[in-house]
Image (spheres, helix red, strand yellow):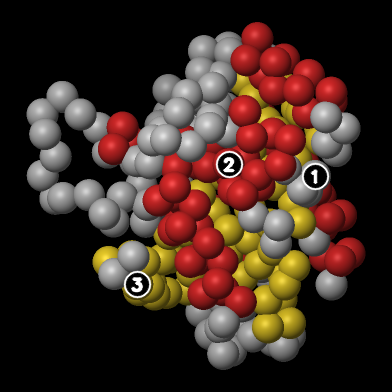
């Protein structure tokens, strides 16, 4: 048991998943990791590696797997994503984690960064199996990706505690956006806590982007996230 790439079939298409499966205990907590815009790159792989070292089964699917190698000029891979397909991909990854032969996995949480923060919030509305959701600066929460309602408009369906981390200098989500999401979660009685950081904008966790990375916010938010998962996942074992 170690860190590896697995390949799943989703809607008849192969999807690679970067997954870490620790040795030792026969039962482990699982964490889905939702990629950011650049994909399952060195940063997202590092997230999986760090969670693996904490004893979690962590898995990050490649959400761009349906897209052609060459995309039309002027479009982005993020712009081609659709929420119904994202939900199918994340659910397939969750099922794969639960079906591992090496270890029994459960309970399961989710964390996402940038577009992955949007994904983690979305999946918290779509899956009753999640027990905790962490959102790092998830933008485009009020936009439809495909035909489904926006993640914000699905807030009523969230069934687990949510923790959010945001930079006060970000523009997507802006502080006003974060206030709106916070107010909606409060109105609906959803357990949540938001942490906001001065001197930080978008992607402050991404050490691959020196212009955006903010060490104090990155370290502080990572520690808060681990404490959150310990409270809501490990205590549910």
Q: Nearer the viewer, residue 163 or 155?
A: 155
Q: Earlier in the sequence, mark 3 or mark 1?
A: 3
Mark 3 vs mark 2, CA separation in Å: 22 Å
237 displayed left or right of 149: right
Q: Earlier in the sequence, mark 3 or mark 2?
A: 3
**Residue closest to the far front:** 147
The quarter of the image holding the C terminus is bottom right
Residue 106 image point, x, y percent? 72, 72
**Looking at the picture, does residue 143 appear above or below residue 179?**
below
Which structural element holds mark 3? strand
Q: Is residue 201 visible?
A: no
- Report the residue at 67% width, 19% height from top: 178
Which structural element holds mark 1? loop
Residue 133 image point, x, y percent? 70, 47
Q: Which residue is mark 2?
A: 122
Residue 180 is drawn in which quadrant? Answer: top right
**Looking at the picture, does residue 59 appear above or below residue 202?**
below
Crowd around label 2: few <14 · some 14–19 · many ≥20 (10 Å): many
Q: Which residue is mark 1?
A: 161
Residue 29 is drawn in which quadrant? Answer: bottom right
Residue 55 image point, x, y percent? 69, 70
Q: Number of marks in the image?
A: 3
Q: Earlier in the sequence, mark 2 or mark 1?
A: 2
Q: Which residue is mark 3?
A: 9
In front: label 2 or label 1: 2
- Report the residue at 45% width, 28% height from top: 144
Q: Nearer the viewer, residue 91 or 36?
A: 91
Q: Kindly indicate whether the residue at mark 2 contacts the one at mark 3 (C-beta within 8 angstroms).
A: no
């Amino acid at each position: 048991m170690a860190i590896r790439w697995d390949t799943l079939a989703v809607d008849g298409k192969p999807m690679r998943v970067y997954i870490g499966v620790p040795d030792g205990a026969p039962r482990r907590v699982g964490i889905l990791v939702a990629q950011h815009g650049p994909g399952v790159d060195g940063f997202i792989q590092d997230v999986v590696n760090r969670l693996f070292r904490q004893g979690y089964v962590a898995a990050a699917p490649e959400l761009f797997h349906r897209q052609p190698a060459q995309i039309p000029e002027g479009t982005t891979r993020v712009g081609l994503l659709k929420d119904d397909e994202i939900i199918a991909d994340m659910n397939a990854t969750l099922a794969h984690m639960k079906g591992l032969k090496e270890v029994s996995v459960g309970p399961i949480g989710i964390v996402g960064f940038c577009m992955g923060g949007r994904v983690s919030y979305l999946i918290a509305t779509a899956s009753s199996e999640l027990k905790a959701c962490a959102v790092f600066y998830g933008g485009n929460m009020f936009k439809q990706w495909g035909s489904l309602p926006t993640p914000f408009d699905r807030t009523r369906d969230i069934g687990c505690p949510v923790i959010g981390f945001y930079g006060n200098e970000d523009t997507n989500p802006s502080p006003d956006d974060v206030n709106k999401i916070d107010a909606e979660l409060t109105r609906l009685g959803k357990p949540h806590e938001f942490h906001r950081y001065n001197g930080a904008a978008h992607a402050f966790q991404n050490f691959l982007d020196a212009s955006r990375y903010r060490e104090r916010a990155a370290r502080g938010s990572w520690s808060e996230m681990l404490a959150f998962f310990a409270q809501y996942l490990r205590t549910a074992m």
